[in-house]
Amino acid sequence: MKKLFIILLMLPLFTQAQNKDYRIYAVAKQQEITVSQLVSELKQADVIFFGEEHQDSIAHLLELALLKGLHQQQPKVTLSMEMFQTDVQPILNEYLQDLISEKNMIQEARAWSNYKDYSPLVAYAKKQGIPILAANAPSRYTNRVTRLGLQSLSQLSEDAKAWLAPLPIDTLTGAYYEKFVSLLGGHSSLGSFQLYQSQNLWDATMAWQLATHKKLQQQQQILHINGKFHSDERLGTYLQLQRYAPQYKLQTISCMPVEAYPPPAWQQWQSIADYIILTQSATID
């Protein structure tokens, strides 16, 4: 109850700079900015990546504030979410069209266990008629790749392949691979490479969904929400989308919780994202 009360008090503050619960930095300009300034600066972007830590409560509130701002600025906007898998798109659409209950949608669309953190985004999109893109690859196929490698996808039916990025999938060897191996502790093996292949299936499928939707809906600006590993350093899903659709203007946001605000690290941040958001979610009990 205390947490809800604090969050409600915070909502009017999302347009103010120097908010104690978050800070937004425009890296190229080397300036701290407000949410409203961020919305304005993103006006010309085709696809906006919001990279989050999935348990960051302030990030979820900022995502909602950003979606509202983008929608008010440009009504033709789409919300894309890692949190839903491509094969549940029909179910998600039925919920958005008010054909099924939220309870059924949560169960049958395999919503994440912390769906309550994302439900305000979905509720706003539903109320405003904003499309939601179920962007993630079905876990049964990423699991298959982890066990058997990318080549095993060739045995799937054409109907099954339709839920995934087209084969073959680029495994983005180089910086992204080194980053992934480092995350695993620096130990490369056949098992870790197949896990890396499944990561690329994940990334490529999200990117393919973005590219396909944007091609069909040229006027739609897309806000895509994913874990920050998928888009930080303009790798992963970001780089896959560049390969599928190099003509689109992409902007990246990397949001991360911190215990205390450090001095801006402009040079380091340049390689991470166009906008850095620091939050103090851990300070809210």
Image (cartoon, grey):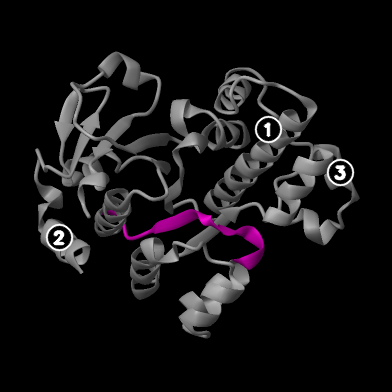
Residue 13 appears anywhere in the view: yes
- Which residue occupies 79% across, 27% down? 190
Three-letter amino acid code at disc 1?
A: Tyr
Residue 42's disc is none
Q: Say which element carries label 2.
A: helix
Label placed on residue 6: 2
Q: Where residue 101 appears, x then y in whole percent? A: 49, 84
Q: Quadrant of the C terminus?
A: bottom left
Q: Quadrant of the N terminus?
A: bottom left
Please state which amino acid type lies under the numbered disc 2: Ile
The span picked out in magenta is: 73-88
Report the residue marked by disc 1. 196
- Determine crowd level at label 1: few under 14, some 14-19, many 20+ residues with C-alpha closer than 10 A: many
Visible in this render: residue 163?
A: no
**Closer to the eye: label 3 or 2:** 2
Q: Position of residue 127 (x, y in %)?
A: 34, 75
What residue is shown at x 90% (from left), y 50% (from top)?
A: 155
Q: CA distance from mark 3 to mark 2?
A: 49 Å
Residue farthest along the right direction in this orientation: 155
Which residue in the structure is indicated by mark 3? 152
Q: Secondary structure at mark 1?
A: helix
Q: Residue 145 placed where, x, y %?
A: 77, 43
Magenta span includes 80: yes
Q: Is residue 207 above or below residue 96?
A: above
Relative height, residue 37 to residue 134 (above, below)? above
